[in-house]
Image: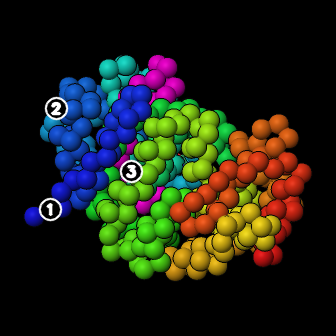
């Protein structure tokens, strides 16, 4: 007998449900019926890596449930997260004459979720979008919460929109065939959640629990994120905590020309900020060693060769900057983090402390 589906409600506006379990893509048509009643047209947006694996399964299930489907496939990779890909998707939706009663489905990882979600937010000033995450990173983080964005020349995720999905279906069977480095990429965002809110969840990552119980881990990460997003949908306050490791992480991505994957960059960013926080006396207890060991156990980096000045320059283009200040997320102890505003001019010294510590 297959595992029961775990359902996590997200009380945003509009509200939706995140469903987690095995074999969900093959049943996506019937599972979406409540959130997006058939008949309507569903534009399934995916990339060239995921399309060959799951597009047929998804389209068959949707057609079987009374939906008309149209697929759009763009080249896989972070390099596609740009205005040209967005424009291609928007022109496709317009050529296909999708209307406001139709729907976009994002089938894939974080880049696909961002591209399809942003296109759905812009097209006709907003149509429904369902998220079908196929990577661990998109399952534990990016498919939930409604953030969508593209990268600009000046930095990562600099143009985007908030669009809460109509539903999220997370098929845990997809994780079984993920290449190890793609799985590790998602582990970084899951470990981030443990550092943010839950020492027992963090303990699971120290003891191989992620590979053993992925559905449990995803459900706990999503439940935590759902609560944060419900309280702060537009990232005015508490939601900024979810950016732990992201200031330095985004800088590493930018310095590498986006060749370092997001989760790997966030892992290194988390290790750097933990070392810096400890060295500068901002933590309540030692955290850096434990975070670094956990990241290493999950095949993730704990540092970077880019110099502090280059990282600080890249980070100062980040959205988290406001005027002359930037807000960092600081681990106080495992399971508790805090926001700390510092002058941008102090950033090189903070990053240097994290690289040297
Ligand atoms: N990935 C961080 C957030 O959704 O707020």
Residue found 85% across the figure and 48% down from its top: 343
Disc on the earlier residue, 3 or 1: 1
Q: Residues within 10 Å of mark 2 (few under 14, many from 20)?
A: some
Q: Secondary structure at mark 3?
A: helix
- Measured from the top left, where is residue 118 in percent x and y? 51, 34
Helix, strand or loop under label 1 = loop
Q: Residue furthest front?
A: 284
Which residue carries the number 1 mark? 2
Is 163 magenta? The answer is no
Residue 136 appears in view: yes
- Look at the numbered disc 2 and give the secondary structure of its residue: loop
* Residue at the image position 67 percent from the left and 67 percent from the top: 284
Measuring 43% from the left and 67% from the top, which residue is drawn there? 201
The image quadrant where one finds the C terminus is bottom right
Q: Which residue is mark 2?
A: 66
Range covered by the magenta-colored residues: 120-137
Q: Answer with mark 1 or mark 2, whichever residue precedes in sequence.
A: 1
Q: Quadrant of the N terminus?
A: bottom left
Name the residue that disc number 3 marks.
Answer: 223
């Amino acid at each position: 007998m297959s595992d029961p589906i775990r359902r996590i409600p997200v009380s945003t506006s509009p509200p939706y449900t995140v469903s987690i379990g095995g074999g969900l893509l093959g049943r996506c048509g019937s599972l979406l019926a409540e959130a997006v009643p058939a008949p309507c047209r569903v534009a399934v947006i995916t990339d060239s890596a995921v399309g060959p694996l799951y597009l047929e399964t998804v389209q068959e299930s949707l057609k079987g449930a009374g939906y008309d489907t149209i697929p759009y496939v763009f080249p896989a990779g972070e390099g596609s997260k740009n205005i040209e890909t967005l424009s291609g998707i928007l022109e496709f939706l317009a050529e296909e004459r999708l209307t406001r009663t139709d729907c976009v489905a994002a089938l894939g990882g974080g880049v696909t979720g961002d591209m399809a979600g942003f296109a759905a937010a812009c097209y006709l000033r907003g149509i429904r979008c369902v998220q079908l995450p196929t990577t661990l990173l998109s399952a534990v983080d990016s498919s939930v919460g409604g953030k969508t964005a593209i990268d600009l020349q000046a930095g990562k995720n600099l143009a985007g929109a908030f669009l809460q999905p109509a539903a999220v279906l997370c098929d845990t069977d997809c994780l079984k065939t993920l290449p190890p480095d793609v799985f590790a990429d998602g582990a970084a965002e899951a470990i981030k959640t443990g550092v943010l809110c839950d020492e027992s969840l963090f303990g699971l990552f120290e003891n191989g629990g992620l590979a053993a119980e992925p559905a449990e881990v995803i459900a706990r990460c999503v439940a935590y994120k759902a609560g944060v997003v419900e309280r702060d949908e537009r990232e005015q306050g508490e939601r900024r905590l979810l950016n732990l490791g992201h200031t330095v992480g985004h800088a590493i991505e930018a310095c590498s020309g986006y060749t370092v994957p997001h989760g790997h960059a966030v892992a290194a960013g988390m290790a750097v900020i933990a070392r810096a926080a400890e060295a500068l006396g901002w933590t309540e207890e030692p955290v850096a060693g434990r975070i670094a060991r956990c990241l290493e156990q999950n095949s993730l980096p704990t540092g970077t060769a880019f110099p502090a000045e280059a990282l600080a320059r890249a980070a100062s283009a980040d959205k988290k900057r406001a005027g002359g200040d930037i807000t960092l997320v600081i681990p106080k102890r495992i399971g508790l983090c805090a926001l700390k505003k510092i002058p941008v001019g102090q950033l090189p010294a903070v990053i240097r402390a994290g690289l040297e510590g």
